[in-house]
Amino acid sequence: METTKFRQMLHSLGLLTIIVYFQFNLSSSQGNELPYMTSDVKEVSGKLFDYIIVGGGTTGCPLAATLSQDFSVLLVERGGSPYGNPLVIDKRYYGFSLLQTDEFSSVAQSFISKDGVKNHRGRVLGGSSAINGGFYSRASDAFVERAGWDEELVKESYEWVESRVVFTPELTPWQIVFEFGLLEAGILPYNGYSLEHIEGTKVGGSVFDNWGKRHTSADLLEAGNPKNITVLLNATVKNIIFHTNDDAGKEPETRAWGIRFIKSDGSSNKIHEAYLHRPKNSSPWGDVILSSGALGSPQILLLSGIGPQEHLKDFDIPLIQHLKGVGQGMQDNPCIALLVDKMPMNRLPEPPQVVGIADGLRFIIEAGVAPISFNASRMPIAAKIAFPASKGKLELQSTDPKQNPSVEFNYLEKDKDMNQCVKMAELLERVAKSESIALFLGLKPQEKLMSSTDELRKLCKNNVRTYYHYHGGCAIGSVVDDDYKVYSVNGLRVIDGSTFQESPGTNPMATLMMLGRYQGIKLLRQRRDASSNL
């Protein structure tokens, strides 16, 4: 969209004044000091850091804040700052950022999977926590147990996040009515306000405060040591720099030494580099850590020569390490949505505040008011399958790191997923056609529901969409070990949702934020233990 036309739309919505206000109010929400941020690649080029984190998103920001307690950290984000952008910060314009996308600079980057389903990924400091519905809910106890995490440290890490960016929402009339609709449909018990992932109907946490301001994971940078963090914005990492030690009599050892990066706006293809500090004597090294998400992290590994050998050969990328699991096991939770309003209207957008969790945690149902243009919105009720069996893969389309990779999720490919979708659609219809929702909308309650399994199968097949909770591509056990270290390469880790084999909780945002804090603390402890043993 041309800038002039976009500004005209903003003016018609009263947003232009708000933009000016936010531009003079760029500090974050809590009055603490943010780290130094720059978009000048020359300021970082050639510098050395203890840790380099690629991706200033939902996990990368808390990870950087935590590591900065003891070490210098470079946090590289391909997008810009969320501060000063009302389409990110102001709840009244929730969802608008998904309507205004472009090739290089929009906070949301759109892509279409090979399944033909449109999707988005965050391209802004704070990542997808800056463009999503802001619903905050922890992972289930079973997920934590399967991950093998320290339960006490997980709890402490969640609480660290929650004390800074999570709020108890004030329910809107629509959310209250939706809550009754869930209970009418038998999604019980009623759990009230809870951050736990438990069966029934509940009110979740929100990253929107009661003044309607969004608090992204970027706000967690305030908890770090600002003297130890440098945030490089609008810079895209091209690949990782490696060094192989071929000392005689020793096994060759490949180690990540730094990164190569370019400006994100396409104005220059000049390549810049930043490096890890080389410790003196036998002190432990830091790491290059990929926190670029389920699309970005496997893409960077492939561009760096780590992945399936034959695929890398197709793009003439020199092989560093053959790891066939890179880009494999990609999953997205199949979603079906029903519109409960008759036609588009100019309602204020509403993010979800209430959730129904049903069928042994297998189905997640939420509702909101979603903009479809800058002056019209609809009222969808959406449900997702929490544990799909179908999997796909991610591959490169080119060696340009600014371009999206190719990804296929194979929605509902497995019969198990299709059968679950039919069952979920029946439940979704009961909620959507509940008496509470009908009365709220001024409609006559409908007694007849779809009774044909064939109709429901057709609904699932023709209307499957994303819930924006895609994950995989760098799974633990095939690409990284239990400490998130990439196999057979020293000094390189992946810490983000690409390592997940299922989407945790109602919404993965809470657990991704927690993961950054959790793994940051583990790294600090490991480094302190290693230093004490010298």
Image: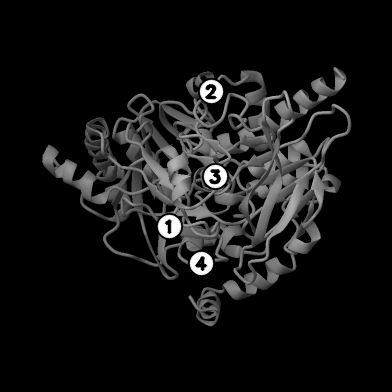
Q: Quadrant of residue 382?
A: top left
The circle on residue 103 is: 4
Question: Local crowd at mark 3 within 10 Å, few (<14), some, or many (≥20)?
Answer: many
Instruction: Report the side of 515 relative to 429 (left or right).
Output: right
Label 2, on which residue?
Answer: 147
Taking depth in this image into account, of 34 and 416 the one nearest to the observer is 416
Label 1, on which residue?
Answer: 111
**In the image, what residue type sits under mark 2?**
Ala
Q: Is residue 418 above or below residue 98?
A: above
Q: Nearer the viewer, mark 4 or mark 2?
A: 4
Q: CA distance from mark 4 to mark 2?
A: 36 Å
**In the image, what residue type sits under mark 1?**
Phe
Q: Is residue 81 visible?
A: no
Label 3, on which residue?
Answer: 293
- Element type where label 2 sits in the image: helix
Point out the tag, 1 or 4, that comes first from the N-terminus: 4
Point out the tag, 4 or 3, that comes first from the N-terminus: 4
Q: CA distance from mark 4 to mark 3?
A: 18 Å
Point out the tag, 2 or 1, that comes first from the N-terminus: 1
Residue 495 placement (x, y as % from top left)? 60, 36
Q: CA distance from mark 1 to mark 3?
A: 14 Å
**In the image, what residue type sits under mark 4?**
Glu
The residue located at (65%, 61%) in the rendering is 262
Residue 281 placement (x, y as % from top left)? 88, 29
Point out the tag, 4 or 2, that comes first from the N-terminus: 4
Point out the tag, 2 or 3, that comes first from the N-terminus: 2
Q: CA distance from mark 1 to mark 4?
A: 10 Å
Question: Local crowd at mark 2 within 10 Å, few (<14), some, or many (≥20)?
Answer: few
- Element type where label 3 sits in the image: helix
